[in-house]
Every structure is written in C-alpha cells, then in structure tokens.
Amino acid sequence: MKMTFTDKTKQISDQFILLEQTKKQLEEVLGESSGLVEARWDRTEDARGRPIYVLQLKDSFGEVSGNFAPTELQSPNQIDFRLYRLWGDLLGAQTKKLLQEIAGN
C-alpha cells in the first residue's frame, strides 16, 4: 500500500510518528486489497483552530476521507475502529459504482 504524508503532517513530530504507525494497522484492515488502495494523510484545522488529521483512501472506484483528532491517534483501538469504518465507506463507494455500471448509468 502506498501511504503519503503532506508536509503539514510532518510538522509535529510526535503526531507524525503516530500517523506513520497507522500504515501497519491499515494494511491489516485492508487485507489482500491493501495493494489496490492509496492512503494520504493531511493536516488541517477545525472551526476552533485545533489540528485535525485527514486520511484519504483512494482506489480505482472512488475515494473517501475521515477526520482524526490528535487524541484519537494515541488510541490503537480507536484508530482500528475508525479505519474499519473508513474501509467500509470505500467498499460502499465501490459497490455503488459497480451497481451503476450494471444498471448502465
């Protein structure tokens, strides 16, 4: 799996280390599909100016993204849960696109 990080994600070293550690977890979540998915981490701010990390998953069918608070990155269980949900969202996008193709849309 290809995982990339924007320059903004590298600015806070302890949080960047946590982002790098998500690669192994994400590969486990994706299983055999890990070679077909690209992941990209970015950092932005919420409405209150607090840092938020955005993970984008992309494959040939579509893309999805999820926002992660820095505190979530510190909890392997929370990350696992969120990665499974995000993977489920991408699978849903794949299913929707395939159904549209079958229906001729």
Image (cartoon, grey):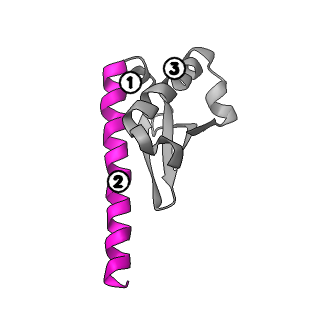
Residue 43 as seen in the image, left or right of residue 104: right
Q: From the image, which quarter does the C terminus lie in?
A: bottom left
Quick one: label 1, few (<14), some, or many (20+) residues within 10 Å? some
Measured along the vertical axis of the image, is residue 38 above or below residue 20?
Answer: below
Residue at image mark 3: 18
How many callouts does the rendering have?
A: 3
Amino acid found under the numbered disc labelled 2: Leu
Residue at image mark 1: 72
SS label for mark 3: helix
Amino acid found under the numbered disc labelled 1: Glu
Q: CA distance from mark 2 to mark 3?
A: 25 Å
Q: CA distance from mark 1 to mark 2?
A: 23 Å
Quick one: label 3, few (<14), some, or many (20+) residues within 10 Å? some
Where is residue 52 shown, x and y percent of the image? Answer: 48, 33
Q: Nearer the viewer, residue 45 or 91?
A: 91
Q: CA distance from mark 3 to mark 1?
A: 10 Å
SS label for mark 2: helix
Where is residue 6 shown, x and y percent of the image? Answer: 66, 37
- Asked whether residue 51 appears in the rendered view, the answer is yes
Compare marks 1 and 2 and give the one earlier in the sequence: 1
Residue 9 as seen in the image, left or right of residue 75: right
Q: Please give the range of residues in magenta.
A: 76-105
SS label for mark 1: helix
Residue 2 as seen in the image, left or right of residue 27: right
Q: Mark on residue 91?
A: 2
Task: Identify the residue at image location x=34%, y=28%.
Answer: 80
Measured along the vertical axis of the image, is residue 1 above or below residue 64?
Answer: above
Q: Mark 3 near mark 1, Cβ–Cβ under 8 Å?
A: no
Magenta region includes residue 91: yes
